Amino acid sequence: MDRYGQAKEMFAAYGVDTDAAIEKLAGIPISVHCWQGDDVIGFDGAGAASGGIQTTGNYPGRARTPEELMEDLKLAFSLMTGKKRLNLHSSYAILGKDAGKVDRDAYRPEHFAPWVKFAKEIGLDGIDFNPTCYSHAMVKDGLTLSHPDENVRKFWIRHCQACLKIAEYFADEMGSYSLVNIWVPDGLKDVPADRLTPRLRLRDSLDEILSIAYDKTKVRVAVESKVFGIGVESYTVGNNEFYQNYAATRGISCLLDNGHYHPTEVVSDKIPSLLAFYDQVALHVTRGVRWDSDHVVLLEDELKEICKEIVRNGATDKVMIGLDYFDASINRISAWVVGERNMDKALLFALLQPHDALRKMQDDANFTEQMVVQEELKMLPYGDVWEEYLRRNHFAGSDWFELVRVYEKKVLKERM
Ligand code: RNT
Ligand code: ZN
């Protein structure tokens, strides 16, 4: 018997159907962030990321133009597995003749038309979108939607409204919803004199953004909280409590970024809490090392726990999985692919657990056996099922890195 045949029997002994897991995995969409390819810089003139997010490293070959980014993304997507969506930031607008004339508050669908063409060409499932409320001169005193000056707030309100319309265009073109995730860097470096008023302004700005007409069946809005950022350590306007209450009362969703909580809090535990109240939950999967450092996603225990919560609660259609990390110290295409494949591997791990049997052990207070079985399960041959998943779907094999090496020599080395 071949390795997969043996693995299939070993999982079957626990009541797990490996064929069903393989089939299910191929259909779970993952939204891949465009910003790993160019160190979160974008094309609309900013030059470097700001607002408490930071990319470190100087590995050669950063994509500097839309053409380069698309070329890199194309290779990266070809080495990923499963259903894929593209996650764009508005700073990746391709302005053409409007460059220098049209600002972020007036971006239109046409500025993203090449992205739609690209996404269709490579057969992506949909496009998600993010207003870019950082790396811009209208970020004043580190604030955007919560700034005391109405003109500043209005600029970012118009920007977010423009993004809703662009997302509607993505949804129409791609025939799939578009998730619009709003994250703002607003915060303070030192002890605030007023914690409430900026939050009231953020609340009202968000209300104004959502007051325009947009098709809620096509555009799904989420808000992303954060605990702190570099330079804004003492106070974050859009913290967890603010956005959970905001989303719950406004009929939108929360986006949980697993780098955005205190170090002993885990997103795996938050997902089921939100599923008790929300139809949808959005994720930014990242890896924080000591802080929200956005390291490349590795196949770690917490990632597996996150995936277990998605899978065993039947929430693969409710939890919108997006990636959010950026490493400029290694080959960026490799960074994309490693993180994305780890997300799929963790989902496969979750799909291969005997959830019903384990749940029964918990309910029967059979904690001894539950621990024994959970530990035994860790040594099952997941890799053989993974290889079979790749083979059946004609996905790049585990030796994909060779193609990146060749591309680096041929293409990336030329970018000086
Ligand atoms: C920042 C947030 C946010 C960004 C992206 C680029 O802390 O995680 O999601 O990383 O929008
Ligand atoms: Zn994020």
Image (spheres, rainbow, N blue to C red):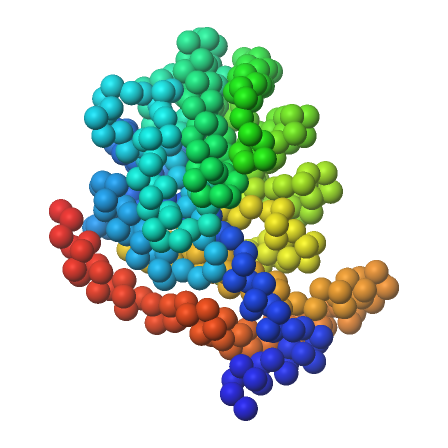
Q: Nearer the viewer, residue 245 or 165?
A: 165
User: Does residue 397 lie above or below 234 as drawn?
Assistant: below
Q: From the viewer's perspective, is 118 left or right of 63?
A: right
Residue 213, quarter of picture: top right
Residue 143: percent from left, percent from top: 44, 19
User: Does residue 42 lie above or below 370 as drawn?
Assistant: above
User: Does residue 1 lie above or below 41 as drawn?
Assistant: below
Q: From the viewer's perspective, is 386 left or right of 53?
A: right
Q: How many marks?
A: 0
Residue 254: percent from left, percent from top: 60, 36
Q: Is residue 257 visible?
A: no
Q: Nearer the viewer, residue 154 or 273?
A: 154
Quadrant of the image containing the N terminus: bottom right
Q: Residue at x 33, y 46 (%)?
A: 118
Q: Residue furthest right?
A: 364
Q: Is residue 402 visible?
A: yes
Q: Residue at x 36, y 62 (%)?
A: 79
User: Does residue 414 lie above or below 64 as drawn?
Assistant: below
Residue 380: percent from left, percent from top: 59, 76
Q: Residue at x 22, y 40 (%)?
A: 65
Residue 196: percent from left, percent from top: 60, 16
